[in-house]
Every structure is written in structure tokens, then in C-alpha cells.
Image: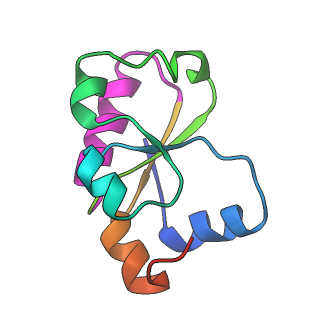
């Protein structure tokens, strides 16, 4: 697992890079504010309900949550199942909103 900062992620998004972004929060959190990631709550990942990303085992996957804790768990868990390039968004949505407000 690697870490990625909110600044680096925002720069990549602003540059139009295609990014595999996964939100591991709960649906109510995602509905309140999100930056466009695919919603797969941590519980689904831990139960291996991950068919949406199974084909991306070799690709970069950036995970985020509220603070960076659940997304770190998701990264470490998926690495143990063969995912090669997981990244945790440090600080999560709290850090994102602190730096950029509610915008993407």
C-alpha cells in the first residue's frame, strides 16, 4: 500500500487523468459529500463482494473514506488478496474538505 495526498489526487483529477477511485464509506456518507469515487463500503470489501474491481488487480486503485482509516484497512486487505497497486488517500474527506471545501 502506498499513500496519496489530497493535493496530489486533486491535481491528477484536474489534469483529467483516468483514476480508479473507490469510496469505502457508507452510503449515507457518500450521499452527503463525495468526489466521484465508486461506492464500495468497507464491509462489502471485507466480505469479498468486489466484482466491480476484480479486473483491476494489476491497476492502480485509490481508496478513500472519512479520515483515511477505513481506506487503509481496505488497501491492506485487498493487497492480501493479490491487488498490486492500492493507494490510501491520507486524511480522507475531512482533509479534502479542509483544503478544497465541497468542490471536486
For the residue pair 27 and 42, the one nearer the viewer reads as 27
Q: Which colour assignment does the render follow?
A: rainbow
Question: Total label count?
Answer: 0
When the figure is inspected, residue 44 is found, relative to residue 14, above or below; the finding is above
The residue at 50%/60% (across/down) is 35
When the figure is inspected, residue 73 is found, relative to residue 57, above or below; the finding is below
Q: Position of residue 72 (x, y in %)?
A: 30, 46
For the residue pair 14 and 81, the one nearer the viewer reads as 14
Q: Position of residue 66 (x, y in %)?
A: 27, 60
Image quarter for residue 14? bottom right
The residue at 60%/16% (across/down) is 55
The residue stretch that appears in magenta: 67-84
Going by the image, does 34 lie left or right of 61? left
Going by the image, does 14 lie left or right of 42? right
Q: Tell me the chief SS of the magenta region.
A: helix
Verify whether residue 72 appears in magenta: yes
State whether residue 7 appears in this view: yes
Quadrant placement of the C terminus: bottom right
Verify whether residue 82 appears in magenta: yes
State whether residue 65 appears in this view: no
Q: Position of residue 90 (x, y in %)?
A: 38, 62
The residue at 58%/63% (across/down) is 9
Quadrant placement of the N terminus: top left
Q: Position of residue 101 (x, y in %)?
A: 44, 83
When the figure is inspected, residue 94 is found, relative to residue 48, above or below; the finding is below
Going by the image, does 36 lie left or right of 92? right
Amino acid at each position: 500500500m502506498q499513500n496519496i495526498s489530497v493535493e496530489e489526487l486533486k491535481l491528477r483529477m484536474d489534469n483529467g487523468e483516468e483514476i480508479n477511485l473507490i469510496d469505502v464509506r457508507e452510503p449515507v456518507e457518500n450521499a452527503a459529500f463525495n468526489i466521484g469515487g465508486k461506492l464500495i463500503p468497507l464491509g462489502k470489501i471485507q466480505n469479498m463482494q468486489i466484482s466491480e474491481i476484480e479486473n483491476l488487480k494489476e491497476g492502480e486503485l485509490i481508496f478513500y473514506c472519512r479520515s483515511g482509516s477505513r481506506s487503509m484497512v481496505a488497501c491492506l486487505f485487498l493487497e492480501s488478496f493479490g491487488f498490486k497497486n492500492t493507494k490510501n488517500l491520507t486524511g480522507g474527506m475531512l482533509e479534502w474538505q479542509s483544503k478544497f471545501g465541497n468542490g471536486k
